[in-house]
Image (cartoon, grey):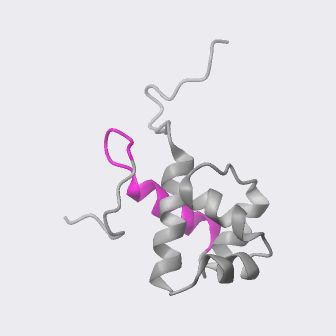
Amino acid sequence: MGALSGEGSGVRISQSPQVALGRAIRLRREEIKLTQEALADAADLDPTSIRGLERGVGNPTWDVADRVARALGLALHELARRADELETNDRRPTNQPLGRPSQ
């Protein structure tokens, strides 16, 4: 069997998932008016970990991602969806507001 590929599978392979996740975390944190320190405390993490995640340089474990999501008042899948929505067609995250696409 060859290398894994997203071609034809309908699965998008992101080249920058940490950046999109970081922006989703920051936007939600600002939306609910938490400081990085308050978020770190609520997620039982060090504030430097939150800063790294928001900058897109952190690569969280499932446990850390879940703790951050819960501290933000979201389920993990909701945080992942928000991160996915921040990625544009060429897979570069933007700071556009989160929301449902218009129909």
Q: Is residue 73 magenta?
A: no
> Quadrant location of the C terminus?
bottom left
Q: Position of residue 72 (x, y in %)?
A: 60, 79
* Residue most extreme to the left: 103
- Asked which quadrant contains residue 21, the reply is bottom right
Q: Position of residue 46 (x, y in %)?
A: 77, 69
Is 79 placed above or below 29 here? above
> Who's the residue at 33% across and 69% down the image?
97
Q: Nearer the viewer, residue 81 or 27?
A: 27
Is 56 placed above or below 9 here? below
Q: Nearer the viewer, residue 84 or 40?
A: 40
Is 14 placed above or below 56 here? above
> Who's the residue at 64% across and 57% down the image?
52
> Who's the residue at 49% across and 75% down the image?
28
Q: Position of residue 71 (x, y in %)?
A: 67, 79
| Magenta segment boundaries in residue numbering | 75-92
